[in-house]
Amino acid sequence: MPLPFILLGAAVLAGGFGVKKGLDAKSDFDRAESLNREAQRIFDSAQKSLETARNSAQEALETLGKQKFTIYSNSLIPFVEAFSQIKNIDFKDEKLLGDFSLAVTQTDMLAVRDISLLMQDVVKGGVGSLGAGGLAGLAAYGGVGLLGTASTGTAIGGLTGVAATNATLAWLGGGSLAAGGFGMAGGMAVLGGIVAGPVLAVGGMMMASKAQEAKEDAYANRDKANLAAEQMKAAQVVTEGITLRIEQIHEVLSDLNARFKEFLFGLQKLVKSETDYRSYSEADKKGVMMAAMIAKTLKNIVETPVIDEKGAITSASRKVLEETQGVMKQLNLK
């Protein structure tokens, strides 16, 4: 065969091989692009669900914070003002002990008085002075937790102080990096011990020097997206659990505080006419003690932390809810 035909045949074969390689490369690049789009969808969907859960938690925190503020302002502080006027209170009144298996002591009342006095300056500033961060701190920790230093009564005006010890609260409360929060990654890093998801580079197909490498990188991207999605789902479950606990506390506080207002009104009316406990009727003495016991219970609920420094729901918040149910049953408030 003449040489020119041999060269022509080789050129055709080479050209065909090149076309195939080109088609294979295009197929690999198309697959890589498809995988990267899938990875982005997986990541974005999980992130959106987690953000929805966070928004719900933030709303619940602010609602509970406002509720606690109102209880301090309209219930506990007025109670302390009225109760402190009563002289010669007998906390061991044997005639009443049969009616109260859940005793209230002078120490209990001093604790209610102390936190109420500490919260007076905060209340005077109005709920608006707390800001979203202060409300989140009040909801999560109560009055003592809200105060930077209990002895000075310095209130935390934003999330900065709170976030210094609890990135989860900063995240749940909407804290930004600029405000002292830690953003999504920081919140997830401590939320139930979950490690923050890997940073996913899926801003578009990675144009590797070789099509095969691009496809392999895209598979790795999808794996990272799936891992991040699993971690965000776990964080979402924890976040939803925190929201549920907050809503449970809000419901119990609403019921208990509504009943407490009746006793508070009676107590305020009583001390206007007489402040010596010894001269009270048995019905009035019982009313004083019931008001004191409900005040103690309210104080315990609003001061019990909902989440701990690691971002997990506290067992104490579950316990105080159970104890409150017992008190309400004992006092025939349900």
Image (cartoon, rainbow, N blue to C red):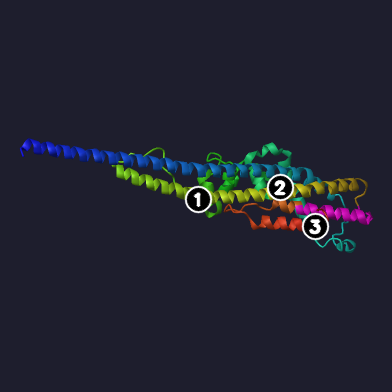
Task: Tell me where residue 55 sits by quadrant.
Answer: top right
Residue drawn at point x = 25 percent, y = 41 percent = 21
- For mark 1, what is the residue? 231
How far separated are the C-alphas under marks 3 and 1? 41 Å
Q: CA distance from mark 3 to mark 2?
A: 18 Å
Instruction: Write down the residue under mark 2.
Output: 250
Q: Please, what secondary structure does the residue beneath circle 3 have?
A: helix
Q: Position of residue 13 (x, y in %)?
A: 17, 40
**Viewer-closest of 151 and 314:** 314
Q: Secondary structure at mark 2?
A: helix
Q: Is residue 284 magenta?
A: yes
Q: Which residue is mark 3?
A: 329
Is 282 placed left or right of 314 in the picture? right
The amino acid type found where label 1 is placed reads Gln
Instruction: For marks 2 and 1, give the one nearer the viewer.
Output: 1
Q: Dot 1, how many residues are within 10 Å of its Cα: few (below 14), some (14-19), or many (20+)?
A: many
Residue 231 percent across, percent down from the top left: 50, 50
